[in-house]
Amino acid sequence: MTAGPEPISEAARAALNRELSELRSERASVTSTLGDADEPGDRADQADELQRATEADRLDARIEEIEGRLREASAAGAPSTDKVGVGSTVTVRFDDGTESTVHIGELADADDPALVTAASPLGRALLGHTAGDSVSYATPLGRTTAVVVSVGAPGGGS
């Protein structure tokens, strides 16, 4: 990955927005149970209050992280069609001659069988490469190679 802002696919943006909505709802539920009383009660009440406050802090941190990622993606613009990056659609040819078109994303998505996360061995190997480049990566059966056939924008192929 580059040091600058990274673009994300529309599917990843939608997933982050869904998670953000769920987190905000959960946070509202947690904070509504935080007490306003000067005397929280016995030690068990104090421990429960502390646990809810800790959970609210955890939710706030994740909300801030997602909002920052969405801002960064907006600043980055569309994925490059020259080099493989997060959000790219890439066609690769494997050693056995088969070709596959995959989408490079940040978040795993069971509904998108063509999605390869940027953190996966193939995803890491592809990042930064261009059409014609050969990449090598680890699989459970050992190292393998693939050739980048084409790089395109999300949903656009090459």
Image (cartoon, rainbow, N blue to C red):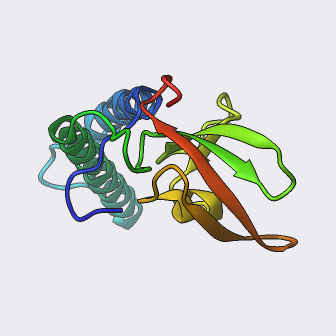
Residue at 31% in and 61% down: 50
Location of residue 15 with respect to 149 vertically, above or below = above
Give whichever of 15, 51 is nearer the camera.
Answer: 15
Q: Residue furthest bottom?
A: 142
Task: Please give the name of the residue rendered at 54% of the width and 60% of the height, measured from the top-left corner.
Answer: 133
Percent coordinates x, y for residue 15 in the rendering = 45, 31
For the N terminus, the image quarter is: bottom left
Q: Nearer the viewer, residue 13 or 147?
A: 147
Q: Is residue 92 above or below residue 4?
A: above
Whether residue 100 is situated above or below residue 2 in the rendered picture:
above
Left or right of residue 141, residue 125 in this image: left
Taking the image as shown, residue 112 lies to the left or right of residue 8, namely right
Q: Name the residue at 11% across, 53% down.
A: 38
Q: Position of residue 149 (x, y in %)?
A: 60, 45
Above/below status of 146 relative to 91: below
Residue located 20% across and 35% down the image:
74
User: Is 158 left, or right, of 29 in this rendering?
Assistant: right
